Amino acid sequence: MNLADSGGGGDDRDAGNERYAGDDTVGVGPMPTPWPTDERFNVELLEHGDRRNVADRYRYWSVEAIREDLDRDPFPVEVAIENWEHDFNIGTVVRNANAFGVRRVHIVGRRRWNRRGAMVTDRYLHVEHHRSVEELLHDASSRDLAVVGVDNLAGSVPLESTALPRRSVLLFGQEGPGLSDAAQDAASLVCSITMYGSTRSINAGVASGIALHTWVLQHAPGPPQSRPSGG
C-alpha cells in the first residue's frame, strides 16, 4: 500500500491558490486586525480573504490545520474506487468522501486519476493507492473493516433497506463494467441503489454520494458544531 500523490504532483501550496478566481462573492474577505495568533490560521488568508470551498468553521485555517482537525475524530467508514481505465468520476467520489466526513479514499488499480472533479478536496483527506483488490482487502481486514460493494448486480440487496456495517469500506466499480469480478469476490455484501427511470445505471460519483449519505443516516452523530472564524 502506498500513499498516493494527492496534492497534484507533490505541490503543497496552501491558502489562496484554491480561490474561485475573480469571484469576490465567495467566502470571506480579509480579517480586520488585530489578527488571531492561533497557529491554525494562515497569514495569507487573513490578509487577502478566504475564497476557498470550505465550511465556515474552517475559514482562514491552513490546509494542514483543517486536516488535523478532521483527523481528530474520524468516522469508521472509508471509500474505495476501482481505476483500471482512468474513470473520470473518481474526482467526484473524492469530493463526496470529503463532504461526508470520510478520511481515507482508496484508489485501486492505476495510480493516476483525474482530479478535476475533486475540486482540491483531496488535500483535506488521505488518498491511498492499491495495485489490486487483494491489496485493498488485506488492508481492510487488518483494520477490521468490512468491504461493501455498491453495484446493481444480481443477488445484491437494496441499499435503502440494508443495515450497513459501521466499520466499512464502500467499494465502487468503474463506469460501464461496474465492480470487477475480484471486487465482487472481496465484498462481504453488495448493495444496489433502487432506480425508477429508464436508465440501467448511475455513475460512481452519484452512487458514492447516495451510499455515503445512507451510511451517515445510519451511523453518524449530529452535524459538527459551528465555530466562529475568529478563533
Image (cartoon, grey):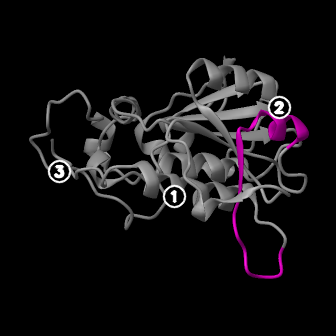
Task: Say which element carries label 2.
Answer: loop
For disc 1, the marked residue is: 213
The magenta stretch is 180-199
Task: Say which element carries label 1.
Answer: helix
For disc 3, the marked residue is: 228
Q: The residue under label 1 is which amino acid type?
A: His
What x and y, as percent, mark residue 19? 46, 52
Looking at the image, is mark 1 or mark 3 earlier in the sequence? Answer: 1
Q: The residue under label 2 is which amino acid type?
A: Arg
- Between disc 1 and disc 3, the foreground one is 1
Looking at the image, is mark 2 or mark 3 earlier in the sequence? Answer: 2
Q: Is residue 192 above or below residue 196?
A: above
Marks 1 and 2: in contact by CB < 8 Å?
no
Q: Relative to the observer, which residue lies in front, 182 or 96?
A: 182
Mark seen at residue 110: 2
Measured in 3D between alpha carbons, the distance from the residue under mark 2 to the one under mark 1, in whole angstroms, is 27 Å
Q: Is residue 75 left or right of residue 96?
A: left
| Quadrant where the image shows the N terminus | top right
Q: The residue under label 3 is which amino acid type?
A: Pro
Mark 3 Cα-neighbour bin, 10 Å: few <14, some 14–19, many ≥20:
few
Mark 1 Cα-neighbour bin, 10 Å: few <14, some 14–19, many ≥20:
some
What x and y, as percent, mark residue 133? 79, 29
Q: Relative to the observer, which residue lies in front, 211 or 126?
A: 211
What x and y, as percent, mark residue 149? 72, 45
| Quadrant where the image shows the C terminus | top left
Q: Is residue 92 left or right of residue 51?
A: right
